[in-house]
Amino acid sequence: MKKLVAGAMALTAMTCAQQALAQSQVSIYGIIDTGVVYTTHANAAGDSVLKMPSLTASFPSRLGFKGSEDLGGGLQAMFVLESGFAVDTGAMGQGNRLFGRQSYVGLKNGWGSLMLGRQVNMTYLVTAKSDVMGPNIFSISSIDSYIPNARSDNAIGYLGSFNGLTVGATYSLGRDTSSAGGASATNCAGEVAGNAKACRQITGMLAYDGSSYGISSSYDILYGNTGAANGLTSSNNHDQRVTLNGYVMLGQSKIGGGVIDRKTRAATANTDSDLYYLGFSTPLSVALVLDAQVARLKVKGTSNNSTLSVARLTYNLSKRTALYSSVGYMKNGGSAAIPLDVGGTVGVGMNQFGVMTGVRHTF
């Protein structure tokens, strides 16, 4: 009898475990991507430099955990914890955050997803649809370093898709709690009593994706506060971006482009600029892919302008491992000093040429 009871208990435990496994799923994923980059005119003296980049190669390296649980009735719980890191040193990225790329929990059903925590915002999502180079070391991320870092701390986010139409928004109570410096750590924690506007951020997106084309637009405004970087030292200061983006598929080839209008109202100065980009991606064979892009930044009311030309060739050794090489050229006019490589340096008004070769592995 005891054996029968024990067997029944074991069978029940196994059944419950199988049901729990079917209802809850957790996965580990990541990218390890690095190489060697050479650029000219890396300082005021016009010297060149050979280095292993920290911020990005063809993609930023990362380690992530994500999971979901079926709650019944079409409702699911979900979470994402994603950490960025520098392959060259092993250091944590995104302002020395443990889970700096994403850290949120939420619920989703047929009406969309509701998320709480650090998450990518709508500028990030719409640009990714049309930017064929993505966060490549030579890309529009060099011109506007906010684009690959368009994330918000303390954010409430919504994303829903309905028959090709996608709508989304984020509202951050305090957009950036890190003071480590750089584009992803601008020292604006917010959540200040008596100043609801301090370090707030609002983003919104409307997009449509058809069978062979897509068009999208986004709005993004972030406010400052005392001590915040980039001259946004008051909650009356703000940095606003409005984008219009699109892409079209021609067989397996993709053409994508867009414009980002940026207006900054800071304590130091007010600026108004437009960033235009146009690129294409096409497979040359089953394993070989060519990507190319031209982008131009114009700062209105000045002679400062920068033009980027970049091409990348990727050879896929397998579904998970690839070799690649990028070549790029940045032309700076006036007193512009925008580097060709993300996180790099260039002499004021100098043009810059660069080559990057690396290897990428996903898991």
Image (cartoon, rainbow, N blue to C red):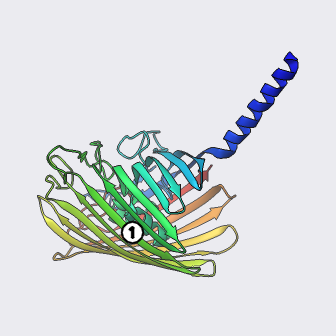
Report the number of discs.
1
Q: Is residue 5 left or right of residue 210?
A: right
- Badge 1 crowding class, 10 Å Cα cut-off, few under 14, some 14 to 19, many 20 or more, is many
Helix, strand or loop at disc 1? strand
Looking at the image, which is closer to me, 164 or 338?
Answer: 164
Residue 62 vertical placement versus 352 (above, below)? above
Looking at the image, which is closer to me, 231 or 207?
Answer: 207
The residue drawn where x is 71% and y is 35% is: 17
The residue drawn where x is 24% and y is 48% is: 188
Q: Is residue 158 left or right of residue 318?
A: left
Looking at the image, which is closer to me, 228 or 197?
Answer: 197
Where is residue 152? Give x, y as percent.
35, 52
Q: In which quadrant is the N terminus drawn?
A: top right
Residue 101 vertical placement versus 275 (above, below)? above
Where is residue 191? Give x, y as percent.
23, 45
Q: Residue furthest bottom?
A: 250
- Residue type marked 1: Met
Q: Residue furthest top?
A: 2
Q: Is residue 308 left or right of residue 313?
A: left
Confirm whether residue 341 shows in the render. no
Where is residue 48? Give x, y as percent.
36, 57
Residue position marked by numbered label 1 in the rendering: 205
Confirm whether residue 180 shows in the render. yes
The residue drawn where x is 44% and y is 57% is: 38
Where is residue 4? Give x, y as percent.
87, 22
